[in-house]
Amino acid sequence: MEFDLTPAQRQRRAELAEAVRERLGGAPPSTPDGHFTRERWRAAADLGLTGLCLPVEHGGGGLGAVDTALCLETFGQACPDTGLAFGVAAHLLACCVAIRDFGTPETAAELLPGLANGELIAANAITEDSAGSDVGGLAMKGVATAEGYRLTGEKSFSSNAPLADVFVVYAVTDPADGFLGTTGFVVPRGTEGLSVGPPMVKLGLHGCPAGRLTLADAEVGPHHVLGEPGQGGMIFQHSMGWERACLFAIYLGLMEAQLKRCVTHARRRQQFGKRIGEFQAVAHPIAEMRQRLESARLLLYRACWLMDQGRTDVTAVSLAKLAVSEAAVANSLTAMRVFAGSGYLAETGIEAQLRDSVPSTTFSGTSEIHRTIVARGMGL
């Protein structure tokens, strides 16, 4: 059992960290009225981040789940804008993976090169007002036509949507078939009948814009169907396996950078004639931050390793997602207490880490959903 990184992995991470700091480290986190720009997106793409696990023949990095997660962890640690890191990871894992594994050869050749090099931005569109965790309750309809399918309905929360060029959309094509009645589609932004709402106002992750998506009798051709009709539920779960295992590595990176800041602050800050790190009331919570981070990291690496071995384990993935997301929130709350009044100020970036961490317990399945998956995995 090997726990260490290979020399190649260490070198890739070191080079990527330096490049991210040089290209993206100088800008502060995005604000509620701002989000990532095409320029910043292309800067991330130039570093290979938008195509990490896409095929080499289409311009991607050809990486497996572990190496993809390691790169995203480095991105999350070195980039101060967690929203940008989240947007890139969502593009890659929720969208590009679905196109990579289930797109027709025509669609793959048409879209994957642009998705890999950052010329195209992708958005996943499955959530609806009445279908969040209950993806079996989709209201969007897909009706077969002589030319393909006609899509009608509305998606309520699509990350990257306001800037996206390509949408991975899920719609019910056969209501009588339940889970087997949903189909996945690739919908280009210029499709007639497709409209995208303005960016939503959110608590955190401001760097990644999210918006509503409306399709009104939008026609898509047969080559834009993902997999076979009725495979949408399976395709979504497949892409979510990659997202839940790999995307949360950006929070490992956030927590690593956060922990280092807390340790440095506790060493420098003095109260009552002593460094605050000498007080057990400060030192022990920081030690707990380290414990949560290291535990979550091992679970995430294990889930990704299992995927690379062809042994996708939904329980392992759910355990990792739970551990990382809840550790990110708990550690961010501790960091706020360590920094006290200065942590409350936007200029320090500590409060932004808390706001960016809170939604991690909701997207990609709520903590309650993942606890249910873990319980079912034990036969409960």
Image: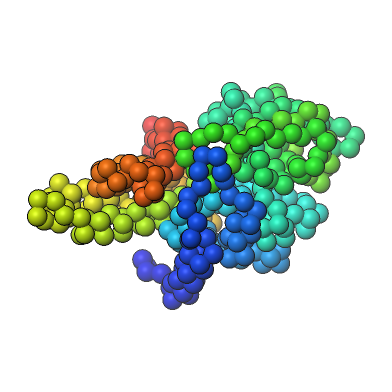
Counting from the top left corner in percent of width and height, residue 162 is at: 66, 40
Counting from the top left corner in percent of width and height, residue 126 is at: 63, 35
Q: Residue furthest left?
A: 273
Q: In this view, does 323 lie above or below 178?
A: below
| Relative side of 153 to 337, left or right | right
Quarter of the picture holding the C terminus: top left
Q: In this rendered view, identify the residue nearer to me: 75 or 51.
A: 75
Q: Which colour scheme is used?
A: rainbow
Residue 363 shows up from this direction? yes
| Relative side of 277 to 123, left or right | left
Residue at 69% x, 65% y: name it.
59
Residue at 27% x, 43% y: name it.
341
Q: Is residue 185 above or below residue 101?
A: above
Counting from the top left corner in percent of width and height, residue 217 is at: 81, 29
Residue at 31% x, 57% y: name it.
261
Tell me the quarter of the picture where residue 373 sits: top left
